[in-house]
Amino acid sequence: MPELPEVETIVRDLQPLVVGRRIVRASLSHDDVLRGVTRRQLTRRLAGKTIRDVSRRAKHAVFDLGSERLVIQPGMTGSLTVHRRRLTSAESRYAVLRAELNRGGELVYTDVRRLGTILLLNEKQWELYDRALGPEPLDPAFSVEQLGSALGRSRQAIKKVLMDQRHLAGVGNIYANEALFAAGIDPSKAANRLDTTDHQRLHAELRRILSAAIRSNGTTFRDYRTGTGEPGNFQLELLVYGREGEPCRRCGTRLTGTHAIDARISVFCHHCQS
Ligand SMILES: [Zn+2]
């Protein structure tokens, strides 16, 4: 699933293409991506609205429509782009949400397996939704102490806690694996057993890696594309994710891959991480 750097890239690409534009009409191909809103309500309420801004919160692209927010969390096979031409037949086959914009162009959410979600929230609902999410790791005000207190209360594996959006926003499997490797922390270690030095290292590495990934337009493993339809490049810089069985770049030990921690693939070095 696209994580913080990928959604940030999408949002930055979309900004100049959608802000100030009015949605002329909207259509939805399938209801299964909707949460708390029906197809009829969504398409009716989107029509005529002007997109005032688009920003990222956690792994969501948030479109500010004035009185409402259109919140899209792209799934693993999802992409969110503005098309200025007719969609190809493959594109229109998997287009889930299409919003025609005034002055030309169409904002399209495409999702082959429809693993993404779409919400339409009023101000009060958005406030509650936002409040339930953890702090943003790239917020300049996000401190080592904040990370420590977000992670410190849980006895669950640190990797699991890092990916829990209620504790910390935007981090998923790829960047949890990478940050834990860079910080030298075993992904299965109980979160409340990390000490201050671990918090400092993890804080620094999380911010360094997420920022570097944004500079590379995110990681393209399968279907992820930027807001202009290009692949990202951070996959070239990954040190552990996708490298199970290969030698550790730091010490040469074979990297371990396991699904035992959280059912997702965890890749780490026995020698470098403890
Ligand atoms: Zn190693």
Image (spheres, rainbow, N blue to C red):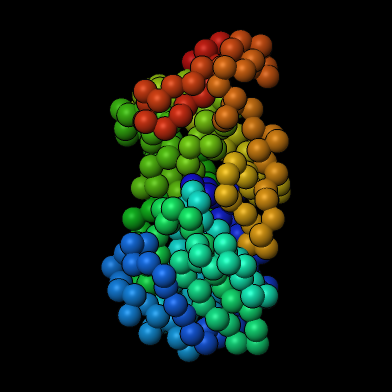
Q: Relative to 91, is 96 on the left or the right?
A: left
**Which of 37 and 12 lies nearest the eye of the viewer?**
37
- Determine which quarter of the picture holds residue 103: bottom right
Viewer can see residue 240: yes
| Residue 261 % position (x, y) | 37, 26
Q: Is 20 placed above or below 113 here?
A: below
Numbered marks: total: 0
Taking 169 as reference, is 181 left or right?
A: right
**In this rendering, is residue 51 above or below 222?**
below
Where residue 87 appears, as percent x and y from the top left, is: 61, 71
Q: Which residue is drawn at 68% across and 50% down?
A: 231
Q: From where the camera sits, is residue 201 visible?
A: no
Quarter where residue 71 is shown: bottom left
Q: Which residue is rendered at x = 55% and y = 21% of the image?
A: 244
Please name whichever residue, 181 or 34, is drawn nearer the observer in this view of the structure. 34
* Residue 63, position as x, y percentages in the image: 50, 71
Q: In this view, does 229 lie above or below 202?
A: below
At 36% from the left and 47% from the top, the residue drawn is: 166
Residue 42 rendering spot, x and y as whole percentages? 37, 77
Foreground of the two, 217 or 132 = 217
Q: Which residue lies furthest to the front in this view?
A: 89
Name the residue: 67% across, 75% down.
Answer: 85
Quarter of image, res 175: top right
The residue nearer to you, when weighing 249 against 186, is: 249
